[in-house]
Image (tube, helix red, strand yellow):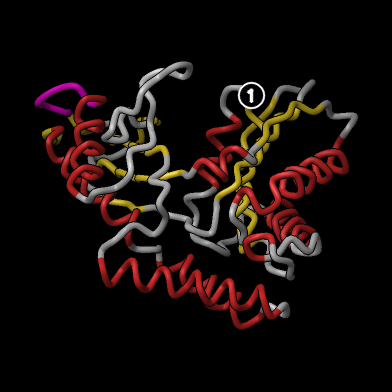
């Protein structure tokens, strides 16, 4: 067994909050740069160029990529051979968020209550997803998630009789309805299967994949490719100004399902697709 102090998780979360909010991941940066060269619309091309310039400035000056610090979503994959010491895990994660956001002067976006709440001013509490995995390491992933993308996201339960045509229309309608409000070009995370309560997490986890990675199941990979092409035919374009680059990628994550239902969740990620990972 390996012992790990929860203070190390606090430090990792704090560092990832700072880095994720100021440094665009290399895969997203490369995809945006490529899109700026390939976009046919002049205003779309200009918009993408400005998005890349904004990322350059944020990295150089250590300032936020976007004024919306988002809700801080933290994924912890905890090895079964790890013993956590030194306090409660939830408290350790929230202390990391508190330090990361306050020390980096990032906007706090969390209200303490859903109705008539007040701003907690340090972006706590985080949304924490923890799962046990083999081994003696802890993988900490921080995903700051802006309000625009989540507001445009949807979940629906389908019957097997409705099948792929209905799911296809749902995916496209979700992107179309969100329009410029989700700050395209998007990464479209799709959860397929599982249950009502789990499919949203599948869609969120799909956003953690590097842009353009292909699903190992060839049938799902084909869906990703086809849905990306169809989304980019919608003409929404960068920031809704029109063009061919409405999405940079479609990533689908799947799970087994009940014979009577097909849960589908579409979670939209804006062009400021922030994420960071540490392995402890």
Q: Give the x, y percent position of residue 120.
A: 30, 28
Q: Residue at x 34, y 54 (%)?
A: 21
Horizontal side of 59 relative to 86 (left or right) equals right
Residue 242 counted in the magenta span: no
Count of numbered marks: 1
Res 110 → quadrant = top left
Give SS at disc 1: loop
- Seen in the picture, residue 83 relative to 192 is either above or below; the reply is above
Can see residue 10? yes
Question: Which residue is the site of mark 1?
Answer: 195
The one nearer the camera, 251 or 246, is 246
Horizontal side of 87 relative to 108 (left or right) equals left
- Seen in the picture, residue 130 relative to 63 is either above or below; the reply is above
Q: Which residues are magenta?
A: 84-89
Q: Residue at x 34, y 66 (%)?
A: 58
Residue 85 counted in the magenta span: yes
The one nearer the camera, 93 or 39, is 39
């Amino acid at each position: 067994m390996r012992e790990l102090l929860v203070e190390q998780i606090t430090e990792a979360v704090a560092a990832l909050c700072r880095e994720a909010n100021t440094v665009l991941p290399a895969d997203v940066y490369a995809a945006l740069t490529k899109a700026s060269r390939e976009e046919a619309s002049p205003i779309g091309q200009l918009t993408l160029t400005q998005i890349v310039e904004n990322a350059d400035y944020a990295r150089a000056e250590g300032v936020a990529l976007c004024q919306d610090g988002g809700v801080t979503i933290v994924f912890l994959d905890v090895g079964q051979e790890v013993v956590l010491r030194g306090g409660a895990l939830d408290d350790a994660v929230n202390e990391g968020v508190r330090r990361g956001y306050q020390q980096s002067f990032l906007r706090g976006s969390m209200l303490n209550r859903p109705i008539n709440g007040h701003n907690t001013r340090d972006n706590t509490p985080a949304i924490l997803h923890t799962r046990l995995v083999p081994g003696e390491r802890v993988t900490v992933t921080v995903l700051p998630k802006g309000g625009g993308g989540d507001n445009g996201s949807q979940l629906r339960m389908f019957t097997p009789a409705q099948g792929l045509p209905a799911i296809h229309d749902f995916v496209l309608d979700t992107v179309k309805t969100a329009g410029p409000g989700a700050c395209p070009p998007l990464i479209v995370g799709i959860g397929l299967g599982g249950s009502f309560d789990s499919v949203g997490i599948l869609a969120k986890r799909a956003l953690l994949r590097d842009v353009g990675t292909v699903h190992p199941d060839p049938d799902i990979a084909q869906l990703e490719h086809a849905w990306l092409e169809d989304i980019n035919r919608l003409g929404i374009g960068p920031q809704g100004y029109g063009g061919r680059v409405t999405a940079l990628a479609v990533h689908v994550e799947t799970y087994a399902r009940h014979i009577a239902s097909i849960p589908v969740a579409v979670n939209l990620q804006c062009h400021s697709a922030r994420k960071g990972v540490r392995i402890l």
